[in-house]
Image (cartoon, rainbow, N blue to C red):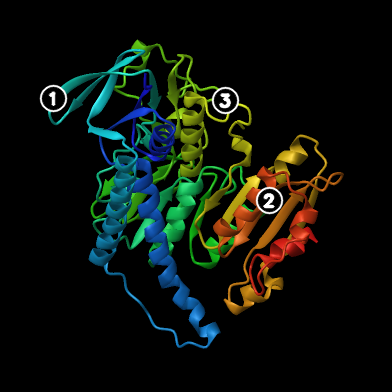
């Protein structure tokens, strides 16, 4: 008898679980209420990166004078930009749908709610239907968090999903939130020429990231005219005529034409009736999972943002694959559990920031002995060729064994280069393995070799 696997949510976690389970012989049914490909992925992540790419292309013209090219001012075409973003999203949604259907996955449009541990009711355009399954995956994702003290209107007070692109391009904007999403929005709007103020509740942007990387980004922001309001926690955002005012707990205020909230996300669990299925949530509302991504109810899994782990598409996709393997009994003898500490992440600012594995501050806090080597990109030919020598490579290794434990990269294409260190960390490679690798010359990756040396 074929195992029936019902997936609620068509984002990266659901898609990966669906295709892998189908290949392994399961009958897979996917229920998606909004967009195949995932709301957080296709309505937030991908559009923001498309906007950043366009803004980066505009700001790149400022380097032209140093590359022997006469500089010219460029302007943004909002309609063309919106069309470009829509085209990218539609294409990705189409290819994802085609892949699922090619694997025999049945896609049902609608909203699901549990009526028991083995049964869901789906409400869709054609009414309600009841589906029974042998196993379930909850992969319903997340949405931007909106606090009680702010009411976005989609015009002047924006959530992240109101910005791709906004109805009116801001002349000035206050960004509330200095985490990954917040600093990306600062970079994006500054690239488009807006006057940007970042409200930072702490004394450093990117709390939890490498302090040197955060400092490099702060310097970049200040050099670009971004105002940093440190140690200020926003408490109110109000409309005032054609603008907004952000009021902070220390009495300071920021006035701008727009404001955007970038203070994290919250899980999409409302309406699922997980309690009826017996599934437990943590105090934040995320679904509790074990190392197999299984909930406290056998046969019900959770993955992606709703699982409360790292909110990265790459992590969600890997969770989906691991779930399919566990469910179908594949690779039991050699199965490796997902190690969240080895997940590479990138921040698409200017300069880019990326890291993976053990952080320097974490090692010192835990009293762990490490070796840290740091090489500036200004020492590489490729950085000088591109007229962009900002940033550095920081490699962390075990001083006794030489094993690569982690690293941080700040600079051009950091998000691509970190994959080399990620592979080294995951495969337990040593610094000597990097040294014995023949890299391309000239290349930014040569800084990795210099750090290894």
In the figure, is residue 77 to the left or right of 324?
A: left
Q: Secondary structure at mark 2?
A: strand
In the image shown, does 325 or 222 lie closer to the viewer?
Answer: 325
Residue 257 visible in the shown view: yes
Residue bearing mark 3: 291
| Residue count near mark 2 (Cα–Cα under 10 Å), binned few <14, some 14–19, many ≥20 | many
Question: In the orientation shown, which residue stands out farthest toward the front?
Answer: 1
Q: Secondary structure at mark 3?
A: loop
Residue 361 x %, y %: 71, 43
Question: Which is nearer the eye, 231 or 394?
Answer: 394
Q: Quadrant of the C terminus?
A: bottom right
Residue 213 horizontal side relative to residue 225, left or right: right
In the rendered image, residue 62, in percent from the top left (x then y), is placed at 48, 77
Q: Quadrant of residue 264?
A: top left
Q: CA distance from mark 3 to mark 1?
A: 37 Å
Which residue is drawn at the image coordinates 64% and 70% (left, top)?
443
Between the C-alphas of marks 3 and 2, the distance is 25 Å
Disc 1 residue crowd, few under 14, some 14–19, many 20+, Cα 10 Å: few
């Amino acid at each position: 008898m074929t195992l029936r696997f019902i997936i609620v949510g068509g984002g990266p976690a659901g898609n990966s679980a669906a295709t892998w389970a189908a290949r392994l012989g399961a009958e897979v049914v996917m229920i998606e209420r909004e967009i195949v490909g995932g709301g957080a992925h296709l309505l937030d992540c991908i559009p923001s990166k498309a906007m950043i790419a366009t803004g980066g292309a505009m700001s790149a013209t400022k380097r032209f004078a140093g590359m022997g090219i006469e500089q010219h001012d460029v302007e943004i075409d909002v309609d063309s930009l919106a069309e470009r973003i829509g085209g990218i999203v539609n294409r990705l949604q189409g290819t994802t749908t085609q892949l699922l259907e090619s694997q025999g996955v049945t896609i049902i449009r609608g909203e699901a709610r549990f009526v028991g541990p083995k049964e869901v009711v789906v409400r869709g355009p054609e009414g309600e239907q009841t589906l029974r399954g042998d196993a379930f995956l909850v992969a319903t994702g997340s949405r931007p968090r909106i606090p009680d003290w702010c009411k976005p209107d989609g015009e002047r007070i924006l959530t992240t999903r109101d910005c791709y692109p906004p109805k009116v391009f801001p002349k000035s904007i206050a960004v509330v939130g200095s985490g990954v999403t917040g600093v990306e929005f600062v970079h994006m709007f500054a690239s488009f020429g807006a006057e940007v103020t970042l409200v930072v509740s702490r004394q450093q942007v990117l709390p939890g990231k490498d302090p040197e990387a955060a400092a490099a980004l702060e310097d970049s922001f200040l050099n670009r005219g971004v105002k940093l309001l440190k140690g200020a926690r926003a408490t109110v955002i109000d409309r005032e005529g054609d603008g907004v005012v952000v009021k902070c707990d220390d009495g300071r205020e920021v006035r701008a034409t727009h404001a955007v909230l970038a203070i994290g996300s919250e899980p999409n669990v409302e309406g699922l009736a997980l309690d009826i299925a017996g599934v437990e949530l943590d105090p934040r509302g995320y679904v509790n999972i074990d190392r197999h991504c299984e909930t406290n109810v056998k046969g019900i899994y959770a993955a992606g943002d709703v699982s409360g782990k790292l909110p990265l598409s790459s992590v969600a996709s890997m969770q989906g694959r691991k779930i399919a393997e566990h469910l179908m009994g594949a690779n039991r003898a050699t199965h490796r559990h997902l190690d969240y500490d080895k997940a590479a992440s990138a921040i698409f600012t200017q300069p880019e920031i990326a890291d993976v594995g053990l952080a320097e501050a974490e090692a010192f806090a835990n009293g762990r002995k490490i070796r840290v080597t740091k090489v500036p990109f200004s020492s590489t030919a490729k950085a000088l060729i591109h007229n962009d020598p900002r940033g550095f490579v920081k490699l962390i290794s075990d001083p006794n064994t030489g094993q690569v434990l982690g690293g941080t990269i700040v600079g051009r294409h950091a998000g691509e280069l970190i994959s080399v260190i990620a592979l080294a960390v995951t495969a337990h490679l040593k610094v000597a393995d990097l040294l014995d690798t023949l890299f391309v010359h000239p290349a930014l990756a040569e800084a990795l070799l210099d750090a290894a040396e």
